[in-house]
Image (cartoon, rainbow, N blue to C red):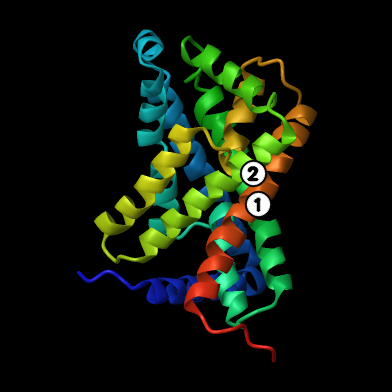
Amino acid sequence: MRLRTPQEITSAAADAGAAKARLTTSQPGRAFVASILAGAYISFGGTLSLIVGCGFPQLAAANPGLQKLLSGLMFPIGLMLVVVLGAELFTGNNAVLVPSMWRGDHSVGAVLRNWVLVYVGNFVGAILFTTLMVYAVGLTAADPWHSAICATAVAKTSMPWLTVFLKAVGANWCVCLAVWLALSGKTLFEKALGCWLPVMAFVALGYEHCIANMFYLPLGILEGAPVSIGQAVTANLIPATLGNIAGGALLVGALHSYLHFPAPRRD
């Protein structure tokens, strides 16, 4: 099947963004439920990434890149589920709603309403999945996973603020490029492959994704990592969220709109 051209991909993204903006306004309850699902899907990918990637500590110690590769190979299932099943993911929406706004389909206020609602829903979904489907059933209670998630939580809250921000720019540049690649095709294989490659790359490179961190940080805290809720929010989630917005909205949504759309309408 013929893949869409870059112009067609951007137009498809704008159509999707306009639909998301309408859903937020006309049916916020459905948008919120779809957001909860996306938070759970990303946490599911994070769980698989953690269990597989950190399950071979001796092997990884001798091959430092192996753990990163294994984690990267597992994580993309979360975005695949989001894209194929139509869930609402904050980081993907950072890019998708920009072409529709650029095209004049809705205002910046509609973008912000969507982002706020979806962000909260993603957080609820991530916390529910983390608490009920990971911590309560003891998936990470034993080593090496217990030590790994505690170390992850400490590492994510120990970086300089600017480092987290820049890593978050890189993460959502990759995630939103994955969404763009998924929009290029119509079959399940094409969409899955489009999601898999860039997301695998961002995880292997150690970039920061705010919705994924809504899984990693709470799980680390639940497992006893010496990290407070305040540290998790101020040292990681805030700069990661801002960096994700910059990476998705500017480097993908705005840049591709500029390249492939006419100048914004000034009605």
Give the Cα distance between marks 2 and 1: 6 Å
Secondary element at image label 1: helix
Q: Position of residue 167 (x, y in %)?
A: 59, 39
- For residue 123, the mark is 2
Looking at the image, residue 105 sits to the left or right of residue 176; the answer is right
Q: Is residue 8 above or below residue 129?
A: below
Pointer 2 with pointer 1, Cβ within 8 A: yes
Quarter placement of the N terminus: bottom left
- Please name the residue shown 68% across and 27% down the image: 159
Is 152 situated above or below 73? Answer: above
Residue 204 pos. (x, y %) = 43, 33
Q: What residue do we see at 29% from left, 66% from top?
A: 186
Q: Quadrant of the C terminus?
A: bottom right
**Where's residue 168, x and y in %?**
60, 43
Residue at the bottom extreme of this rendering:
267
The residue sitting at 38% across, 57% down in the picture is 84
Residue 19 seen from this side: no
- Amino acid type at mark 2: Phe
The quadrant in which residue 49 appears is top left
Q: Is residue 22 left or right of residue 112?
A: left
In-image side of 79 versus 242 (left or right) = left
Please say whether residue 207 is visible from this viewpoint.
yes
Q: Position of residue 146 (x, y in %)?
A: 53, 14
Which residue is rendered at x = 53% and y = 61% of the image?
252
Q: Which residue is mark 1?
A: 119
Report the amino acid beneath label 1.
Tyr
